[in-house]
Image (tube, rainbow, N blue to C red):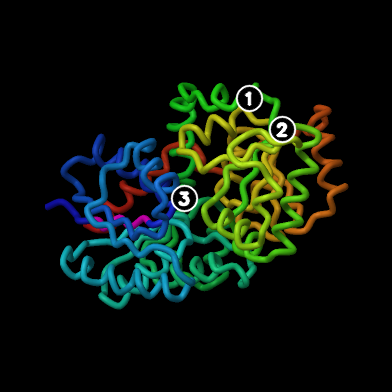
Amino acid sequence: MPKKLLMVVGARPNFMKVAPLMRMMKADYRGRFHSVLVHTGQHYDPEMSEAFFRDLQIPEPDYNLGVGSATHSVQTARIMERFEPVCEKESPDCIVLFGDVNSTVACALVGAKNHVRIAHVEAGLRSFDRSMPEEINRVVTDVLSDYLFATDAVAVENLRREGIPEERILMVGDIMVDALFWGKERAKTSTILERFGLAPGSYAVATLHRAANVDNFNVLSGLLQLLTEVSRHLTVVFPVHPRTKARLREFGLLNKISGDKKGSNNLIIIKPVGYIDFIRLIVDSKLVLTDSGGLQKETTLLEVPCLTLRDTTEWPLTVSQGTNRLLGSKPPVDKVLAVVKEILSGGERREITLPKGWDGRTAERILHTLVERLD
C-alpha cells in the first residue's frame, strides 16, 4: 500500500525544494508513495508562483488554500484554519514541510494537533536572531517534527544542542542543491540576458525582501541608495519582490528609480522572474547583493561572490567555506564599494568547500528514509 504524503508549499523557496522530491517520486519511487500537493497561496503573484511551477515542472496543486497576504499572525491562522479540513479529509501517513515560511509552521501545528507524523526538510537552520519571523518558524517546526532532515553538520549540531532526540535527526544534505543542479542545465536556454542587453560578467544582481530591510523607511532608503552607488561601477539588475515594491510605493521611493528599463545610474528595475531565468542571471553575474537565505547557498554553489545585506545568517558555512560575506543591513557605502571594487579587480578568490551531502542526491536520501521509517 503506497504511503500518502501531504506535501505543503506556500512560497517561492518551497517550490524549489518540493520539485526534486516530486520528480524523484515519479521516476524512481512509483508505487511507493501517493503524494498530495497543497499550495497554501502564501505567494500568489504569478511571477512568484505560477512561473515557478511551470519552470520547475511541478504538477498543479491538488489543493490551493488561497490565503493571500496578511500579518504573520493572521496569515498563520488562516493557513491553519484552511489546512486542517484537508488534513482530516486526506488522512496522510506524513506531512512533508519545507523551510521556514509561515505555511511551514502553520501546517506543523495542525499536523501535531491531529497526531500526523511530520517531516521537516531543511531542519536545524538557525540564525540565532529571534527578531526574524523565520527563526521562530524554524524552531517551532523542528520541535514538532518527527523526521528532521538536516542540511549539514552545523544544522545537526543545532538540533542536538536544543535537545532533539538523536533518532529524529537525519543528515541528508541540501535539497536546494538538487534543484540548482537540475536548473543550471536548463538555464542555458534562457534568453534573459539578451532581453535586457546584458553581457556575462558585466552586471550584479540585487534582491531585497526581508521585513527588517524593506518595512523600515530608513533602512530601505539606505539600501536603495547603496544599490544606486554600486550601479555607478557596474550595472545592477534588481528584480523587485512584490512586498518590496509595495513598500517602495508606500514610502514614495518608486519615483527615485526607473521602472522596467535601464536608469541613468545603470540600475535596472525588473519584475520577479521565473526560476530558469533567475538562475541564468545569477550564473552570469559578477556578484550578488541580497538578504535572501537561498541565494547565499546558490551563489556558493555557483562560485559567485555574494554580499549579504543582513546582520545574521542561517547559513554560516556559506561564509566560512563559500563565497558569502555578511555585511549587515545598514553597511557603510564605502565599505561595500571597497568590496565591490576588489571583486571587479579580480581580487576576490575564495576556496570553496561544499558540505557533505551537497551532491544533488538529497531527494533520493529523503525518500529512502521515508520508505524505511513509514513502513
Q: Residues within 10 Å of mark 3 (few under 14, many from 20)?
A: many
Give how far across and how far down residue 351 sits, in percent.
72, 34
Report the disc number at residue 13: 3
Q: Are marks 2 and 1 in contact (CB under 8 Å)?
A: yes
Q: What amino acid is at disc 3? A: Pro
Name the front one of labels 1 and 3: 1
Q: Earlier in the sequence, mark 2 or mark 3?
A: 3
The Cα atoms of the two marked residues, 2 and 1, are separated by 9 Å
Query: Secondary structure under badge 3?
Result: helix
Q: What amino acid is at disc 1? A: Leu
Give how far across and how far down residue 346 sits, in percent.
80, 27
Q: Which residues are magenta?
A: 5-9
Magenta span: chief secondary structure: strand
Query: Secondary structure under badge 2?
Result: strand
Would residue 233 be found to the left or right of residue 149 on screen? right
Would residue 1 be found to the left or right of residue 16 on screen? left
The Cα atoms of the two marked residues, 1 and 3, are separated by 26 Å
Report the disc number at residue 235: 2
Q: Residue at x 31, y 47 (%)?
A: 367
The residue that mark 1 highlights is 198
Query: Secondary structure under badge 1?
Result: loop
| Residue 263 appears in the rendering | yes
Q: Earlier in the sequence, mark 2 or mark 1?
A: 1
Q: Earlier in the sequence, mark 1 or mark 3?
A: 3
Name the front one of labels 2 and 3: 2
Please tell me whether residue 17 belongs to the stretch shown in magenta. no
Would residue 59 be found to the left or right of residue 199 on screen? left
Would residue 341 be found to the left or right of residue 263 on screen? right
Q: Residues within 10 Å of mark 2 (few under 14, many from 20)?
A: many
Give how far across and how far down residue 133 sits, in percent.
55, 68
Is residue 21 positioned above or below 211 on the image? above
Q: Residue at x 80, y 55 (%)?
A: 331
